[in-house]
Image: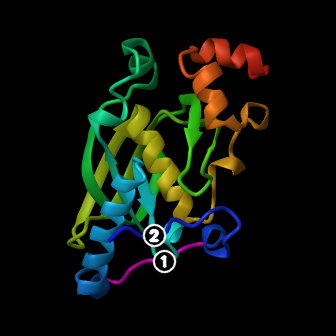
Amino acid sequence: MILKILQVGEPVLRNVARPLKPAEIRSKEIRRLIENMRETMRGAPGVGLAAPQIGEPLQLAVVEDRPEYYKDASPERLRERERNSVPFHVIINPNIRPAGAKKAEFFEGCLSLAGFTAVVARSRSVHVDCLDENGKPRVIEASGWYARILQHEIDHLRGCLYIDRMHSRSFCSLENFGRLWKEKSMAEIRKQFGLE
């Protein structure tokens, strides 16, 4: 079932979500929620969806970056963003930490801020300890675009949106992003917005 994605202004998007207990993770309700979140994320389409975005204050998110989402991107932009496909998976009760000091800046959007995007600096590599959809411990070492997705979704579980981290001068509509910035390098974008 496709669920309604809440938009910025909803209190649940600004509150810290609660951890799931092991018994909850294995429940029919959570299994159904995960499947509905997968359908909702794919229907949007998006590369991640956190439970607070559909009104559930739970530390649960789904992630998937499918090749068709970036099929029109130039090889140069894909290399710059370090973007590769990521198979569908679930993260529950995650703890995240940077895996190094290097940062990467790119435009980032959000299904809960429909129609807008901005440049956000994120850690280039991260280490995530979490539980999977079966309640089993999982360790994720991610870099590039995948690391960005994980940071974005885990922020949602802490009541944080990308607009809290964005370079405000870069905030623009998706229409203007597509028309003006989509094929620009980050060096050009940084220069234009005075981010250097």
Q: Which residue is at a point 57% across and 67% down the rendered structure image?
A: 6
How would you classify the magenta stretch by its main secondary structure? loop
**Which residue type carries mark 1?**
Glu
Instruction: Give the side of residue 148 with respect to residue 192, left or right.
Output: left
Q: Which of the two residues, 4 or 12, is positioned nearer the viewer here?
A: 4
Res 51 label: 2
Q: Secondary structure at mark 1?
A: loop
Q: Which of the 4 image quarters holds residue 78?
A: top left
Q: What distance separates the C-alpha of mark 2 from that of mark 1?
A: 5 Å
**Numbered range of the magenta stretch:** 16-21
Q: Which residue is at a point 76% across and 22% down the rendered structure image?
A: 193
Q: Secondary structure at mark 2?
A: helix
Neighbor class of circle 1 (other Cα within 10 Å; few <14, some 14-19, many 20+) is some
Residue 166, position as x, y percentages in the image: 69, 41
Q: Which residue is at a point 75% across and 16% down the rendered structure image?
A: 192
Res 56 label: 1
